[in-house]
Amino acid sequence: MDAQVSGCAWRTPPHKLGLTQIPIASIPLLVHDVVGVYTALPAILGPAAEATEFAKLWTRRLGTKWAVGMRQRIFLLERVIAPTPPIHGTLRKAQNADLALVAEWGADFARDTSTPIRDPFTFLGRLIRDGSLYLWDDGEPRSMAAAVGTTPNGIRVGYVYTPPSFRGSGYATATVASLSQSLLNDGQRFCFLYTDLANPISNAIYQRVGYRPVSDVVDVNFC
């Protein structure tokens, strides 16, 4: 079990619980332990059987309700397949001067994906200061992605967004491919990301540049 801060800016309570694939029989013990640490959780994320079993026992214990949210697929990449033909433009780190633009994009991303980024200006400003937010620039910014969620061997690529007016030109593909290659060059053994199973376009984009599916997970929200 790994209690981790999600990609969103949670306040109270601050944590979403990420469930690794553990035996169903262990879920009651997990619920017992988590109740001793957290008085509430906004959501959990994990394989469907484990996540729903946790939700049933958690809500029975706390007298709350639960509902299945987004169904996602985890992808992993160890070698980048460069887009062909090459996409015009270059990848660069976002700068403070880009903050107003990326905050607007962040709000649009949150709306389009139902990701609760409470304060895009503050959240994306922090990613800029950390050197974690990247832009594909083709005369002007066309797409963005972030490198977040570092693990001992890998790193997560997330917050991939291209405004509607720039879609269909390969900018998201180029952004993800170039950023993933840069992260591997910096010593990461692999990159990984989550996709919405209901979005076939993003699932296809990531596989074209070398990401392969490894597991399906589901969000379960508490209310």
Image (tube, rainbow, N blue to C red):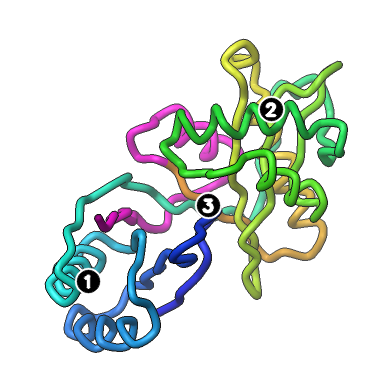
* Residue 45 visible in the snapshot: no
Q: CA distance from mark 2 to mark 1?
A: 37 Å
Residue that carries the numbered disc 3 in the rendered image: 8
Residue 196: % across, % down: 39, 40
Q: Residue furthest top?
A: 165
In the rendered image, residue 68 lying in the magenta stretch gets the answer no
Q: Please tell me which residue lies in front, 16 or 21.
A: 16
Residue at 34 percent of width and 87 percent of height: 36
Residue at 53 percent of width and 52 percent of height: 8
Q: CA distance from mark 3 to mark 1?
A: 21 Å
Residue 222 is left or right of residue 161, and the answer is: left
Residue kind at label 3, given as amino acid type: Cys
Rendered image quadrant of residue 58: bottom left
Q: CA distance from mark 3 to mark 2?
A: 20 Å
Mark found first going from the N terminus, 3 or 2: 3
Q: In the image, which disc is placed on residue 54?
A: 1
Label 3 crowd (10 A; few <14 / some 14-19 / many >=20): some
For the record, the magenta segment spans: 196-223
Relative to residue 174, is residue 184 depicted above or below? below
Relative to residue 67, is residue 87 depicted above or below? above
Residue kind at label 2, given as amino acid type: Ser
Residue at 29 percent of width and 84 percent of height: 30
Residue 2 is left or right of residue 185, and the answer is: left
Residue that carries the numbered disc 2 in the rendered image: 143
Residue kind at label 1, given as amino acid type: Phe
